[in-house]
């Protein structure tokens, strides 16, 4: 017996998924989600493969990723299962880190209200030396043994700055606060208003590293921010979906720097 192929028109798929027909048309135009075929009447029709691809697009969109980044992920040489498992693991780790930060926030609020006492170590639980050591180990495992020399140089450079680590982190918080303000004002990651802010960020990175931070290095830093759950969780505490916006902005800025040379 011939197996019946289930298909939905663009309007039907729009109703089922909660995505507008106009959005589905846009996804088709940019190559993100092509219909299975277009009928003689010009209507788009979607089969099971397209339903699943749309679901994956929506997973990435819900995580705050720009469509260009969603397209890049979908074009990776991985199976859909591998991509979905990776995304699930990323969200689970992000959730774990966020839960730890929320737990410390609640404890601090109760402490300030006089409901409980806190040891000083508890104040910095989400940012502990153990986690810093884990992060450095991850860097070395991800980028090779030469990263250990870069980490040592960075620590020396930060200590040499006025105010040491505390001063450097205060400067970074100012930059990040300004970036969040621009983000929450609704600016896109490619907004011209970001140029000076991202240059401040790049200069801060260069001083912290003790060496230049060129376009490739800034792009690589954005990739690292996006890859490590601790960074994602940290930026999400500044503003929801800020982590993906920031990395997209850094990558766009790196592209501009390349085009200027």
Image (cartoon, rainbow, N blue to C red):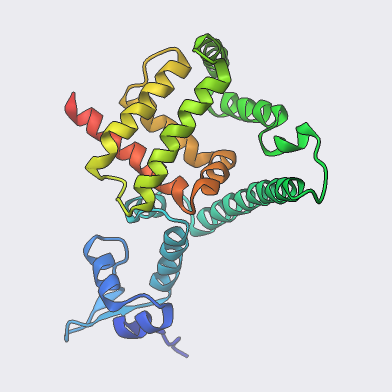
Q: Is residue 47 above or below residue 88?
A: below
Q: Quadrant of residue 4?
A: bottom left
* 118 relative position to 170: left or right: right
Q: In x, y percent, where is residue 192?
A: 22, 41
Q: Is residue 163 visible?
A: yes
Task: Name the one closer to the observer, 167 or 8.
Answer: 167
Q: In x, y percent, where is residue 208?
A: 47, 18
Task: Name the one closer to the observer, 89 or 151.
Answer: 151
Task: Name the one closer to the observer, 5 or 69.
Answer: 69
Residue at the extreme front of the image, as rendered? 114
Task: Name the one closer to the observer, 246 or 16.
Answer: 246
* 53 relative position to 228: left or right: left
Residue located at (29% from left, 35% from top): 253
Q: Is residue 210 above or below residue 203?
A: above
Q: In x, y percent, where is residue 54?
A: 40, 68
Q: Is residue 24 above or below residue 126?
A: below
Q: Quadrant of residue 22?
A: bottom left
Q: In x, y percent, where is residue 66?
A: 36, 53
């Amino acid at each position: 017996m011939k197996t019946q192929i289930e298909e939905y028109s663009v309007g039907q798929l729009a109703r089922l998924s909660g995505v507008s027909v106009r959005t589905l048309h846009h996804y088709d135009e940019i190559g993100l989600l092509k219909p299975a075929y277009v009928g003689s009447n010009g209507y788009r029709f979607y089969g099971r493969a397209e339903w699943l691809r749309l679901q994956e697009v929506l997973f990435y969109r819900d995580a705050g990723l720009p469509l260009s980044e969603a397209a890049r992920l979908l074009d990776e040489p991985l199976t859909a299962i591998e991509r979905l498992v990776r995304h699930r693991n990323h969200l689970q780790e992000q959730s774990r880190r966020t839960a730890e930060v929320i737990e410390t926030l609640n404890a601090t609020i109760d402490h300030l209200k006089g409901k409980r006492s806190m040891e000083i170590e508890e104040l910095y639980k989400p940012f502990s030396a153990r986690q810093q050591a884990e992060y450095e180990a991850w860097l070395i495992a991800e980028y090779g043994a030469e990263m250990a020399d870069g980490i040592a140089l960075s620590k020396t450079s930060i200590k040499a700055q006025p105010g040491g680590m505390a001063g450097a982190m205060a400067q970074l918080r100012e930059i990040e606060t300004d970036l969040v303000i621009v983000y929450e004002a609704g600016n896109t990651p490619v907004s011209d208003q970001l140029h000076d802010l991202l240059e401040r960020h790049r200069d801060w990175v260069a001083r912290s590293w003790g060496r230049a931070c060129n376009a490739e290095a800034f792009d690589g830093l954005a990739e690292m921010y996006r890859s490590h759950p601790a960074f994602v969780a940290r930026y999400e505490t500044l503003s929801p979906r800020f982590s993906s916006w920031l990395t997209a902005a850094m990558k766009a800025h790196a592209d501009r720097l390349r085009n200027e040379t």
